[in-house]
Image (tube, coloured by chain):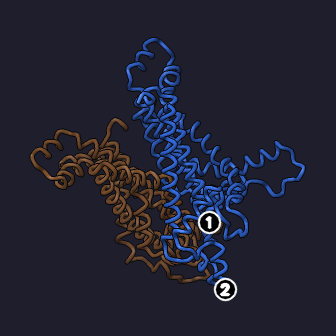
Chain colours: A blue, B brown
Amino acid sequence: MTAWLVRRSLQAAVTFAVAVVFVFILVRLTPGDPLQRLTDDRPMSPEATAQLRARFGLDEPLAAQLGAFTSGLVRGDLGVSIEHYPERVTSLLARRLPATLLLGATVLLLNFTLGVWLGVLQARRRGTAIDRWLTRASLAGYAMPSFWLGIVLVAFLSLRWRLFPAAQMTDPLLPHDAGTLTRALDVLRHLALPALTLSITTIAVTMRHQRAALLSVLRLDFMRAAAARGFSERRVLWAHGWRLTLVPMLTLFGLWLPLLVSGSVFVETVFNWPGLGSLAAGAIAARDYPVLVGASVLVIGTVIASGALVDLSYRLADPRVRAT
Amino acid sequence: MIGSYGALVLRAWHRPSGRAGVLALAVLSLAALLLPPALPDPAAMPDVLAGALPPSSESWFGTDHLNRDIFSRVMHGGRISLAIAGLAVLLSATLGALVGVVSAWVGGWVDVILMRLVDGALAIPRLFILLLLLVVWEQIPLGALILALGTTGWFATSRLVRAEVLRLREEDFVRAARGLGAGGWRTIVRHLLPNAAGPLLVAATLAVGDVILLEAGLAFLGLGVQPPTPSWGGMVLEARPLILSAPWTALFPGGAILATVLAVNLVGEALQAALDPRSA
């Protein structure tokens, strides 16, 4: 186990290093100078431009820039934002992280309750009309651009019918002495539409995974044996069958994270949700590439770490994997 | 081999959702391909002061805030969207097959290094790769957009092809071909690739839907097809402030994305089910 942990951590570290070098190369691969782009409607003196270039390290050779970037990364320093100058990228990211985590956790909860239940229903009713229509409905959700669905939901559910707030995470008119419960309910109301949008566009992944996992279990002889022993249908399904799908469902976390991260860029933009996604989208308009690089490094770290954690829990949960 | 592809496609066709997908996709792409020359100029503003007009017999999908015909813009945008998606997926499927075959066939250090690089690339969500790649460009040319989408979509495909080749390499018929003196290149082209083509076809079909969504998303963020060229994502972006006063400006381009991606994914699902009936 220890040997495996060491090997897996090393592998994660190598992957992270490769990905970070990719990120650095990607920004420099394209023609165009980030500072030029920012200042082209405000003519600057050559001296001022040179000063700015020196501040962001753009006047050094590429190798030196990569060196400075990695040594900063090791010290936990991701540089300075261009748009929010002189704020540090790390403090910007830290400020925006909680909102994204709240949104992500809510979508996770929705997908892993409703999505699992629907997937189980589909597997149980395999081949029937309900199975087919659930597949089609979930595929339709998956085919919707999340930014468009968000706009449509805002138009009807918040602007026309006034059921939910259209944007932001809190009501700016909330009295200052509002209790914790009032505040929590306020956040919850703001959370509803972004979470719904992101969930509709991703729940298909959970459903089809759960359906396939349960179908392969339902085929096994011991399911028939359990039914023959006279257990209730519900007990056979959930206690015998579904329990076995928990381990295969673990792999879903690996698939789910990049999907959520990409989706949150659009959903947070549409709903003005103060998280990492809207920060990244805002950085595009301002050509604030240090923020974009910082956000990417954070996302990459999370993806790799969660992949390693999934592998670890796989090994802990399944003795057959441990034996290899 | 050809016979079994025919059988695969036929089996996919026999699934109702597969047939619906194929038909919808055929109608959509034929319309996007053939109609634009007969339609009004997508940039023309016949009566700019009239602004957004609701759908009528004159303009089926209505007009946008600049009085441009939305039906024409959706069709012109579809042409570009489908062309970008088709070319990008062709490029990424080719790259994925190439890297996968080389990695599996050569093996050793080449395999280790290639797969480590692919691991690293797979750890960056594709949207972020594209954002990083496109953010500092002044004006993104169409060719660069296709190249960017095509070169960022092959990482998972290369793993898939590599796994297929590793599995097939030990099969008797491949050993037999080798034993009969077939060279490496001939074995790859005549025996390995045709047998790995099924999963590759499924992955490529589903990838078309992903690329259409990504391209629309990039346009929505201002990084895709540049105005005044019409694009579905860009039309939704422009329609955002009008969603209550003129909902048709957003509903039609968004609906076009939804219909196209759904059709492509239905075809992909049907192919997948035809390839592996146990999953259905």
Q: Is residue A150 left or right of residue B19?
A: right
* Residue located at (48% from left, 35% from top): A4
Q: Amino acid at mark 2?
A: Glu
- Tag nearer the camera, 1 or 2: 2
Q: Residue A237, how many percent across, how many down?
A: 49, 24
Q: Residue A312, how many percent across, how many down?
A: 52, 35
* Residue located at (88% from left, 53% from top): A175
Q: Residue A163, how many percent across, how many down?
A: 72, 51
Quadrant containing the C terminus of chain A in the rendered view? top left
The chain carrying label 2 is: A
* Quarter where residue A283 is shown: bottom right
Q: Nearer the viewer, residue A145 or B104?
A: B104
Q: Residue B130, how many percent across, how many down?
A: 50, 64
Question: Disc 1 designates what residue?
Answer: A290
Discs 1 and 2 lie in a common subunit: yes
* Residue located at (44% from left, 33% from top): A213
Question: Disc 2 designates what residue?
Answer: A47
The answer to the question of whether label 1 and label 2 lie on touching residues, with beta carbons closer than 8 A, is: no
Q: Amino acid at mark 1?
A: Pro
* Quarter where residue A294 is shown: bottom right
* Residue located at (42% from left, 55% from top): B117
Q: Is residue B253 visible?
A: no
- Tell how many labels: 2
